[in-house]
Image (cartoon, rainbow, N blue to C red):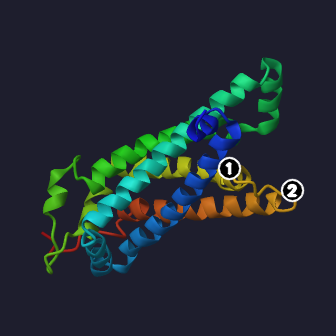
Amino acid sequence: MNLWSRIWNSSIGMKMIMGLTGLALVLFTIVHMLGNLQLFLGPHALNRYASFLQNLGELLWLMRGGLLILFVLHVICAIRVTYLNRVARPVRYRRAAQVQLGLAPRTLIYTGVLVFIFLGYHLAHFTLGATDPSFKELHDSLGRHDVHSMVAKGFGDPRAAWSYMIAMILLGYHLSHGIPNLFQSVGWNHPKYQPVLKRWGAILAILIVIGNISMPLAVQLGLVRVVAGGH
């Protein structure tokens, strides 16, 4: 039996991969949010940041491909761990354990899958411009892709804005349990640190939700608008 077969058939191995990929995805989520929050600094700041990323060329697509692999691995491992746990536990024990676990751990797999599905829409909406090809034609006075106007127009649609906000609430719900759980998955599960990890995991999840929701909400409230001169 090769190494991958042993990991695939081991709940511990799957949890380890799930924890490591989860940690990488949390870090990406924070960096991605901080970059996008430049929306509030005005068109120049956000368009300059977007231009920097686009000028990475093939490296940017390699990074996107790596992130996609991380997402897929994380979801596959989560589904596999759920399956292995159900096979290993008697029915009566599983039901009793579910009552003790609470709602968040039992729904973690479902919120994760929903966020993964939303990611596809998010990429089609802003990254690929598939939902509105006119986004690709937006440029500022310096000839850069006018990402500021793209975001303002995209979130100007209440359906897009509210679907994004709902998805971010689901993400926060997922992270509030997932962040402390990922440390446990990689072996950092000392009883002394678990309460601290749970508390700061919840705080970090709330900050991520607030940061991400603030952008579509600001557009819907008219605080961020398309700047005249973008074309």
Q: State the quadrant of the C terminus.
A: bottom left
| 132 displayed left or right of 189 | left
Image quadrant in which you'd find residue 64: bottom left
Q: Amino acid at mark 1?
A: His
Q: State the quadrant of the N terminus.
A: top right
| 165 displayed left or right of 5 | left
User: Decide: marks 2, 1 in contact (CB < 8 A)?
Assistant: no
Q: Secondary structure at mark 2?
A: loop
The circle drawn on residue 81 is none
Give coordinates of residue 35: x percent, y percent.
41, 71
Mark 1 nearby-residue class (10 Å; few <14, some 14–19, many ≥20)? some
Q: Residue at x 61, y 60 (%)?
A: 206
Is any part of residue 157 visible from this angle?
no
Give coordinates of residue 31: x percent, y percent.
48, 68
Mark 2 nearby-residue class (10 Å; few <14, some 14–19, many ≥20)? few
The residue pinned by badge 2 equals 191
Q: Is residue 129 above or below residue 228?
A: above
Q: Earlier in the sequence, mark 2 or mark 1?
A: 1
Q: Amino acid at mark 2?
A: Pro
Q: Secondary structure at mark 1?
A: helix
Q: Nearer the viewer, mark 2 or mark 1?
A: 2
Q: Residue at x 59, y 33 (%)?
A: 80
The residue pinned by badge 1 equals 177
